[in-house]
Image (cartoon, rainbow, N blue to C red):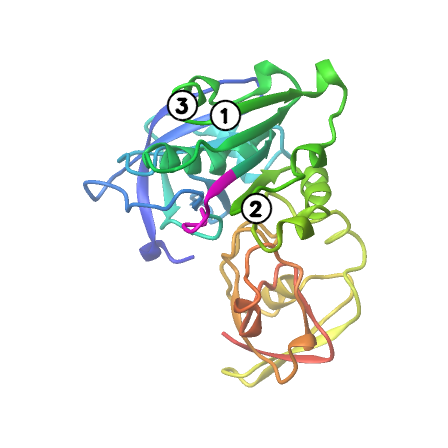
Amino acid sequence: MSKRLLIKSVVTKIDRPTASVTFLHFAPVHRSQFPLYKAGAHTVVRLHDGMMRPYSLCGDPPQSEWRIAVHGRNTPGSVSHRITNDIAEGDYLYLSYPQEKFGLAVTAARHRFIAGGIGITPILAMLYALHHDSSIVTPRLHYFARSRSDCLFLDELEQLNVDVHLHYSTDQGRPDVRDVANEPESGEHLYYCGPPTMMEALDQTAHAWRGRVHSEGFTAKQGLGLGSWGSDFEVALTNAGRRISVGSDETTLQALLKAGIRIDYACEGGICGTCVVDVDVDNPADVDHRDHCLTEQERTTTMAPCVSRGRGTIRLRL
């Protein structure tokens, strides 16, 4: 991601609401305010050495400052671990323009939200947006966490027009999230964000909502990216006249980077959309889409090479 597409930002404040989560507040350096963003959007944070990772913008969208929440219990050397341990107030980071892949359905009559752990971050911005609309039926939030002390933004949620239900695994055992995703009301839309096990459980209930489902995860589905990714295939670069082989033990993105092709990327889990590229296919089935960021329409002309693969030969326009 070129620096010209990023916003140089200063860390104005750091909070640590729990032992494992850090809040970072930002202000832009060379402009009076950040671009406005839609509720549910994320930004990609770029460290000085080029490492990048997406984080949800977890504030009231009309506000001039940006805030992200970083879970610090990550692999040493990861972006989240470095931000948690190495970044201080007054430091500079580069932030991307808002990426809007997860948002509110403007035609929904009702809204139901399910958040797991730090998955509350994009949902909080949506609740702020709904709070500012007096015509909206009070939305319902089911927030799952290990204990009350692990919940984020409780003081802010208490100030918003939202019906909050808290579920603690330490007190009640591990609750089944599917129990709160049943019996959709007329015109109601479901939104959920959280860890992989929660996402997979809720994906199983999606059919009952008849397309009125919106979700965002933070990691790829279990089983993807571990060991074999699938069969070998070939990528033809139509603009460069090159062909690149992709082995069963590597991702499309890894093969392209190894071949010297420069592609911006961040999450490597098919979540953020940073690495999405144009694809030419005669048969849509030639691409095995495994992302969580593209719509079915977008998948006809693009793919996320960090997780998605081809069958036989696929043509990319880079």
Between label 2 and label 3, give the one nearer the viewer.
2
Mark 3 lies on residue: 14
From the top left corner, tell me how far across and down residue 286 is, in percent. 69, 77
- Determine if the magenta segment contains residue 313: no
Q: What range is drawn magenta here? A: 104-111
Q: Earlier in the sequence, mark 2 or mark 3?
A: 3
The residue positioned 73% from the left and 80% from the top of the image is 312
| Neighbourhood count class around disc 2 (C-alpha, 10 Å): few under 14, some 14–19, many 20 upward | many
Mark 1 or mark 3, which is nearer the start of the sequence?
A: 3
Residue 199 image-quadrant placement:
top right
Q: Residues within 10 Å of mark 1 (few under 14, many from 20)?
A: few
- Are the residues tagged 2 and 1 within 8 Å (C-beta)? no
Query: Tags 3 and 1 in contact by the CB under 8 Å rule?
Result: no
Q: Secondary structure at mark 2?
A: strand
Upstream in sequence: badge 2 or badge 1: 1
> Foreground: 199 or 286?
199
Q: Is residue 108 magenta?
A: yes
Q: Amino acid at mark 3?
A: Ile
Disc 2 to disc 3, how far (Cα)?
25 Å
Mark 1 lies on a secondary structure that is strand
State which quarter of the image contains the N terminus.
Answer: bottom left
| Residue type beneath disc 1 | Asp
Q: Position of residue 246 (x, y in %)?
A: 71, 70
Q: Position of residue 204 (x, y in %)?
A: 73, 47
Looking at this rendering, what residue extends furthest in the left direction? 32
Of circles 2 and 1, the one toward us is 1
Residue placed most toward the observer, 120 or 234: 120
Residue 216 is labelled as 2
Which residue lies at the image location 34% right of the left edge and 56% below the top edge? 5
Q: Badge 1 is on which residue?
A: 163
- The image quadrant of residue 242 is bottom right
